[in-house]
Amino acid sequence: MKKTLLFLLAAILMLSGCTKAGHANNLMYPDYDPAKAEPYAGVSATAEVLSPHRVMLTLKNAGETVLLDSTFALYDHKGKSVPCARLCEADGTLVGCYPKADTQICLSLGNQYGALKAGEYTLVKRVLLRRADGATEACGYISCPVKLPSVSQVPYEAEAMETEIIFGDGTPLCKVISATMTDVTPDSGQITWQNESEGALYLGSESVLYSLQGDEWLRVPFTTKPAHGLTLRIIEANESITEKLNWSTDYGSLQPGDYSLVRLVFENDTFENAQHLIVQFQIQ
């Protein structure tokens, strides 16, 4: 009996230790102290809440060019770090923040933190500089307040879709490609992409669909998981390309309603400096 109790006690202590260690590993910036950290000079940030799970971060840079990775941290109104529920590491994607220019980055809070309670938070993002040898190093942080509204009552399936990883999260909105959607049916549509910049751009091949449910944009679930990988199509400067999309292959026949299609675009064929495109359309 004593051996059994000792074994159970040891097991509980081991589990307790694992829980604490796991909790520490789920903090985005374990060494960051919001009470002591000085903001990175030259870059300021504001956050616009797009939904209970998504914010648009706008950065104004009055200094030198800096880089931002795909990570970010949240702190509650008491200054306590919110543990990650899902991803808690950078994926290698870097976004440039340039002098005398606004940079907008759409962040899906649910990707890292799952469902969040309504309330006041502080969003923190790490700033990096590129050294002469090409490597990057952290040089400070930027932060701004975020006030999250209450989550509306939606079905569990819709809530789960919203917090899945999607193409386009964490990347700025592309403003140099315009898109025109025509010949829309429940099964397909045709898009013309117009490159309005002075340089060639590379359009990703994979699309993600959202549908408007009440006042929330929620991800449309796949009926068949796409097996193809990401490929690129080049759009030369001041030129356009047209493509036919058969979304019924991945999503099935779509119901009438409002939809948004998300697509990635890159500055070169090495998948660097990702931006995302959003094309809204309607199925009658």
Image: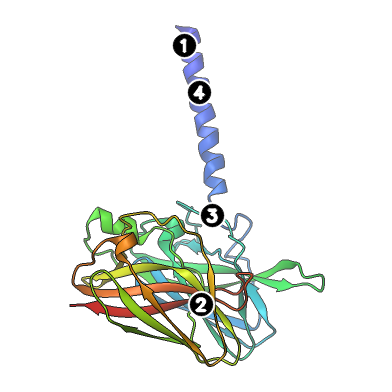
State the residue in front, 90 or 147.
90
Quarter holding residue 69: bottom right
Q: Amino acid at mark 3?
A: Cys
Q: Earlier in the sequence, mark 2 or mark 3?
A: 3
Spatial CA distance of label 2 from label 4 is 47 Å
Helix, strand or loop at mark 4? helix
Whole-percent x and y of residue 29? 59, 58
Vertical side of 182 occupied by 85: above or below: above
Q: Amino acid at mark 1?
A: Thr
Q: Residue at x 58, y 65 (%)?
A: 35
Whole-percent x and y of residue 118? 33, 64
Q: Are marks 3 and 1 in contact (CB under 8 Å)?
A: no
Point out the frontmost of discs 3 and 4. Answer: 3
Q: Are marks 2 and 4 in contact (CB under 8 Å)?
A: no
Q: Amino acid at mark 2?
A: Pro
List the residue tagged with mark 2. Answer: 172
Spatial CA distance of label 2 from label 3 is 20 Å
Helix, strand or loop at mark 1? helix
Q: Earlier in the sequence, mark 3 or mark 4?
A: 4
List the residue tagged with mark 4. Answer: 11
| 226 sits left or right of 25 in the view | left
Q: Earlier in the sequence, mark 1 or mark 4?
A: 1
